[in-house]
Amino acid sequence: MSVQGLKGFKDILPAEAATWQRIEATARALFHRYGFTEIRVPILEKTELFVRSIGEATDIVEKEMYTFEDRNGASITMRPEGTAPVLRAFIQHNLQLLQPIQRLYTIGPMFRHERPQKGRLRQFHQMSVEVLGTDQPMVDAELMAMAWQLLSELGLTVSLEINSLGCPECRPAYNQALLDFIGERNEKLCEDCQRRRTTNPLRVLDCKNEACREQYQGIPELPDHLCPACAAHFEEVRGLLALLEIPYRVNPFMVRGLDYYTRTTFELITADLGAQSAVGAGGRYDGLVGQLGGPKKMPGIGFAIGMERLVLLLEQAGAAEEEPEPDLFIAALGDEARQQAFRLMQLCRQSGLKTAMDPAGRSLKNQMKQAGKSRARFTFIVGEEELAQKAGILRDMASKEQQEISLAGEPAGWRDRIVPIIIR
Ligand code: HAM
């Protein structure tokens, strides 16, 4: 039996490649317009980096990381997300010295040992962006506008949900309000929620258990417990979103699966992917750089978009990209003609045409069949007879129109006569 790939690890097959490339090209061009530059960081990091940033009591760190010992006995983890590695690199290379506000993006695979299902993989790809060095609400709104624009440039409609998780000033009072509320219901809660009381009470807001959800009717809502500074920040973000005409909904129960967030958090939601409703998500993490050993006052904000989910949405919308068809198929017969055609193919490719020929030099009928199958726009036919008469035939495959092309001189001259007709 042949060896199969790992569960949750997916091959991106040639038929999907063009869609992936379009997504990536659209994102890169857009990130560039918003002033972002690329950073590429390793897939492997010290485990400690993720424990210290994502948080010990999160599902990711508790259950989902690909963690192992390397040959020297060091604990290594395959990155489950991109923010911590980008911040690690930012701190390690003192990037804030180059520019007070850094705008970085990275694209690549992430790894989480989750239960695979539609839109949920163990190796998946994110396009993620981070802005470091400012806590201005304008940047929060700008990032949401950028995510929104990316999806609309790809032809997708999603909804934006936002929340504010407050800061170390206001979170303890909210946590206490939550503890008081759930304490009264403790017996009726699931085991996870009972544990969350001591690990991270905020997580109970995210519980999917029906019985818990019923108990949580009337639970205190975060936006009502923000300190004046966080409330003003949130208010300003909302005002700026309205100014940019970005529709959004406040979801007071959005807590996110990573512990580093402060203040603004957001998710881009779709109803078209079943259980996996988040196409992208992010938020502010004003304490994280300091927590990882970098400068203490270095606020940051970012988001990541899941590429597999975008591909699924585009495929479902019938908007998957197809590989562009060849501009030209050269059908050549006979040794001499095939040699010349081979030279012509190279010259046409150098002139920018996607050009193909049959290396086996089968019958003309067979080659024309191949040209049709490849959906080539034009076919150029050159056989011994054409060589003798110094005139090849250029056929427009859609209109079936044919014209003679002089084969006088070298293939470079043939190319000069063919290319303008095809490029026109
Ligand atoms: P996240 O919400 O864990 O955030 O992931 C962001 C996006 O990655 C999700 O909305 C989803 O589209 C995609 N994603 C996550 N897990 C999977 C999976 N198992 N299979 C397929 N797609 C998945 C973060 O990772 C943060 N680092 C985002 C961020 C950047 N926050 C600030 N800066």
Image (spheres, rainbow, N blue to C red):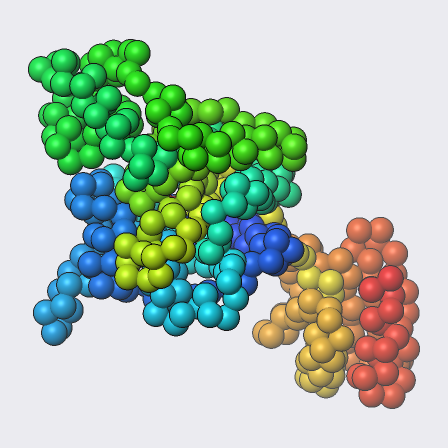
- 324 or 127, which is in the foreground? 127
Is residue 15 rendered to the left or right of residue 364?
left
- 229 or 195, which is in the foreground? 229
Please report the residue visible at 23 percent of the width from the left and 46 percent of the height from the top: 55
> How far across and how far down the image is residue 323, in percent?
61, 55
> Considering only vertical position in the picture, is 237 above or below 112?
above
Figure quadrant, ligand 1: top left
> How far across and how far down the image is residue 73, in percent?
10, 69
> Considering only vertical position in the picture, is 41 above or below 139?
below
- 327 or 132, which is in the foreground? 132
Count the marks: how many? Answer: 0
Please report the residue visible at 38 percent of the width from the left and 46 percent of the height from the top: 285
Q: Residue furthest bottom?
A: 409
Is residue 378 rendered to the left or right of residue 286?
right
> Considering only vertical position in the picture, is 116 above or below 419?
above
Is residue 244 rendered to the left or right of residue 196?
right
Looking at the figure, which quarter contains the C terminus?
bottom right
Please report the residue visible at 52 percent of the width from the left and 52 percent of the height from the top: 20
On the question of residue 333 being in view, the answer is no
Please report the residue visible at 42 percent of the width from the left and 34 percent of the height from the top: 230
Q: Residue furthest front?
A: 228
Looking at the figure, which quarter contains the N terminus?
bottom left
> Considering only vertical position in the picture, is 42 above or below 268?
below
On the question of residue 23 being in view, the answer is yes
> How far across and how far down the image is residue 284, in percent?
42, 44
